[in-house]
Amino acid sequence: MVVDIIVVGGGISGMSAAYDAYKSGKSVIVLEARDRVGGRTYTIDTESGGRSDVGGAWINEFTQPNITKLAKEAGIPIIRQSIHGTAVIERTKNKIQTYEDHGTFELEEGMPEEDRLDEKRVVALLDELCELVDIEEPWKCERAEEFDSISFLGWLNSVGASQATKNGMASFIRCLFALELNDVSFLYTLHYFVCGGGYESLASNDSRGGQYQRMREGSMRVSEYIVTKLPKRSVKLSSPVQAVSQEGDICTVVTRAGAIYTSSAIICTIPSPLYSTITWSPMLPIKKRCYGQRSYMGACTKVVMIYDRPWWREAGYSGLGMSLVGPITQTMDTSDGEWKSSDPTLAPRQYSLSCFPMANFAIEYARLPQEERILSIKQHVARLFPSHAAEAMEPYQVLEQQWLNEEFSAGAPVPVLGCGALTAIGEEWRTPHGRIFFAGTEMATKWKGYMDGAVSAGQQAVADVLKVLPVKKALVNGVNGTH
Ligand SMILES: Cc1cc2nc3c(=O)[nH]c(=O)nc-3n(C[C@H](O)[C@H](O)[C@H](O)COP(=O)(O)OP(=O)(O)OC[C@H]3O[C@@H](n4cnc5c(N)ncnc54)[C@H](O)[C@@H]3O)c2cc1C
């Protein structure tokens, strides 16, 4: 089959690319490895008739226009994150502190004054350093070599951060990357902050931040919606791509099952740690290969505990819980509706707390047998909300998604780079290879790592492809012409 553009990967980035390409008059085929679209967004129907995301979930209509536009076009109601009530923090096992949830990641709450001041000092320093980082070419910024030669932990040590500040930042980085402080290059971290509008924007759950809203029907619905807008049979599920070759202007793609597709261009949207799972002919350029080799995903698990009643809301908790002890790093209320909304179309159909074992906690968690894993989550939720421990132990449905076990994601939520990689190979991070263009959220410079970045990267790749695809010959008044 010959088309203008083959899109490899049917996550949000690939589906957005396919939609834009189709709207630009190009014929397009999406080859998706899984038996569903959506990739790192994955929505499951709950027993109560609700919807629950076990992958990417949060958006912000004010700061993330690309994903919001698609969600609205798809007619998906957008609900606000519940931030009202009391949040809980566990710094030491069984010692639960509480504070009024203001919709921000406030690990300094309840700490001694000198620790609070130190955390403020470090966040202010981070904001200052973000100013130095060029969003398009971070490897060229002043002090790039220095920042890329140390991990985030190395930098915290270099500015004399207190242990309490390091603990707080470790918890934040576990939520952000599902990795530990010493796993990620400091330059990469700064660039990621800049792409997401800064520390406060990434860390907030109110109207300023990345965790402000969710889609009531789940994020996967966006990709499912795009399938309905494309011509029938444009999306080939269960079609993992095995080989990609290009000769002159012709690209050929072969799937594991041996199906062959030909096109004038390819948009590859798979996460970079998976580049090496495809045989490229000719081989990808050396820096592109090294980019794939040196980027990796974190250990990210999401466990959704679904209850018959929102007992935490009734008891005055917002549902936000944080722990430095594990296995859970963070809990969030992920009921699929708005609390006490007067709009019946926003009423919750399921009441849930999403629990995130992240980074090293997720690795230890994964080693347990399934029953013990779920028991450990129940017990931890009971520990975080001791006044309602009995209710916490009795979810009627539990959804568990361990992203490390996913062959076609290799972890989650986003590929990151360790020390030295960005300065050594960053310049080939987004460059095309002949007729092969690269998308996926990690190619975005705004909200890289997020659904919004996935959409914009897909759309950017189409814009780049359109610059090189031959202008089609069309019949104008019976004469061959161009338009
Ligand atoms: C638990 C979790 C929480 C998150 N939270 C948020 C959040 O709150 N807000 C937010 O905005 N983002 C969040 N994210 C991140 C967000 O989900 C991703 O940034 C986004 O979905 C990435 O989209 P993508 O299309 O770039 O990549 P993917 O979704 O990874 O799509 C790539 C596609 O390629 C396919 N593929 C892989 N290999 C092959 C192959 N060989 N052949 C064919 N197809 C292949 C995969 O199956 C996949 O469908 C979260 C992610 C996770 C997992």
Image (cartoon, helix red, strand yellow):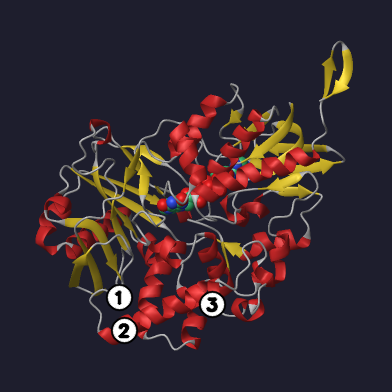
Q: Which residue is mark 1?
A: 108
Q: Position of residue 436 (x, y in %)?
A: 74, 45
Q: CA distance from mark 2 to mark 3?
A: 22 Å
Please tell me whether residue 357 is drawn above or below residue 476 in the rendered image: below
Quote the CA–CA distance across marks 1 and 2: 7 Å
145 left or right, relative to 35: right
Mark 2 sits near ligand 1, with its Cβ under 8 Å away = no
Q: Determine whether the residue tagged by mark 3 lies in a helix, strand or loop.
A: loop
Callout in the foreground (3, 1): 1
Residue 336, image quadrant: top left
Query: Mark 2 sits on what residue?
Result: 115
Say which of marks 2 and 3 sits in front: 2
Does the Cβ of the disc 3 residue fall within 8 Å of ligand 1? no
Disc assigned to residue 480 = none
The residue at the far right in this view is 479
Q: Is mark 1 within 8 Å of ligand 1?
A: no
Q: Nearer the viewer, residue 15 or 284?
A: 15
Of residues 412 and 168, the one drawn nearer to the viewer in this rendering: 168
Q: Quadrant where the C terminus lies?
A: top right
Residue 235 location in percent, x, y? 59, 30
Marks 1/2 in contact by CB < 8 Å: the verdict is yes
The disc label shown at residue 151, or none: 3
